[in-house]
Amino acid sequence: MVEVDARGLSCPLPVMRTKKALDAGPDALVVLVDSGTAKANVTNMLADEGYSVTVTEEPDHSRIEAHRS
Amino acid sequence: MAKHRAIGPSAWIVGAAGLIIGVGAAWLVNQGNPGNMGLCIACFNRDITGAFGGAWANMGGVAYLRPEIIGLLFGGTVAALATREFRPRGGSSVLLRFVLGFIFMVSSLIFLGCTVRAWLRLGGGDLNALYGITGIVVGVSVGAVFLKQGFNLGRAKVMTPVTGWVGTAIMAILLVLALMVALGNSPGFLTTTPAGAKATAEGAVVQGDTVLKPEGATLVDGAVVAEDGTVISPAESVEKAPPMPGGRRAPLLISIVAGLALGVVAQRTRFCSMGGIRDVVLVRRFDLLFAVIGLLVGATIANMAFGQYNLGFTGQPVAHTDALGNFAAMVVAGLSALMLGGCPFRQVIMSGEGDADATVAVLGMFAGALAAHRFVIASTGAGLSDTAWPALAVMLAVLLVIAFVKRERLA
């Protein structure tokens, strides 16, 4: 599965890197983020691009898993 | 291709946040804050700096520990703690973030407002703001090119709790000082612009019927007259004297509660006054743009309701009419905000969320305010200072160097 590690990155890099990964049209991808803002922005974009999203909270980051719905 | 939405549901949430902040800012003007300056992150951080800089930094007229900033940052902390988003983090190009905060502040003080006040000014009918907003769009668009070429200040890392609490702790200290001032027990090192005071072109300061500066002078038939009988400011000059921004303020309790409420709103909604323009230019997403649209609509409606709306270029509160200066200053401010990863409003909120890098950016703003007034770079209602253009040129050059140096090789 395609994985994007956006932990510690400032806006808008988490969104940019996720968007870049989406350009290949993956059926599923994982994005790791560690701020609430990045989590919200990436989750919103994935939803807007037609993915179903689940978020799992790890000790020091959030794991956003997206599947084409 | 799967379905694609350019405007998602979060647009309405962040738009509502903008609306609330715009209305709140106009209401704070109604409660006593300076015109079209109900909430200005640059101006209010400048006023906080002025309380320490005082006359030495030519900041006697802009000296007040603005409770709105304290409230905003506390609001960020409270909301982040409640939602488990408080995360001590930092270490991403710390010094450069200080420089970017510094440049953001100096350029904002040449425009006379930050990326938030630009919209609030337009919402009050100040058409000079259009040049500033055009500048923000250009600055952000230039920055978007840098981002596409790999500009990156580097990853922030998890920090110790102490580091994460520095921003909130600084505001706690400022709150104690603000309360001491309010209770008439101000420490000697602090300056506070007298409430409702106005400064004449000749440098006299008048508060109601009292002359505060120079010492010993009195008002005679509306003119400021020195002890020896010489006229310092003629009556028409006193009549025309603009109010000192630092002396215009809403009651402390209102300011701090409003700041706290708006801080919570901003933390929850990720309100940003720059990100919307950036996202449109960079990734063709429109959600965040509703933040500034909401801000403009909210401020416009509320200003009209309060009878504070004044459409035009001239006679605007705390503004000048140098179109090119307004434009160029906000090119620099917009670019530096983009390079910081968020507008000054967001830097304050993120500082409250445990982001030490954002705290450093805020400290850079304080330093920038001190320099802008000490070295007379900041504009006045009369226009740009002699050093404004050289300062803008140097700051733009520094931004370009930072953008060039901090490129990352993209795979």
Image (tube, grey):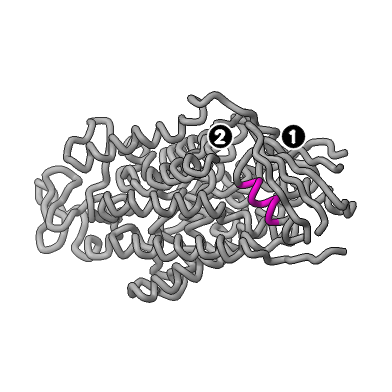
Q: Name the residue under label 1.
A: B405
Specify the principal SS of the magenta part. Answer: helix
Residue B134 appearing in the image: no
Instruction: State the residue in front, B380 or A3.
Output: A3
Of pointers 1 and 2, the one earlier in the residue sequence: 2
Q: Left or right: where does residue B132 sit relative to residue B277?
A: left
Residue B349 covered by magenta stretch: no
Q: Label 2 sits on what residue type?
A: Arg
At x 19% / y 54%, what residue is drawn?
A: B206
Say what secondary structure mark 1 lies in: helix
Say what secondary structure mark 2 lies in: loop
Q: Left or right: where does residue A55 sit relative to residue B200?
A: right
Q: Quadrant of the C terminus of chain B?
A: top right
- Tell me residue B73's x, y (percent): 44, 43
- Tell me residue B89's x, y (percent): 58, 31
Q: Magenta segment range?
A: A37-44
- Tell me residue A56's x, y (percent): 68, 42
Rounded to the nearest whole Å, what is the CA distance between mark 1 and mark 2?
A: 28 Å
- Tell me residue A9's x, y (percent): 69, 38
Residues flagged by tags 1 and 2 on a common chain: yes
Q: Mark 2 points at which residue?
A: B87
Q: How crowded is mark 2: few (under 14 residues within 10 Å), some or many (20 or more)?
A: many
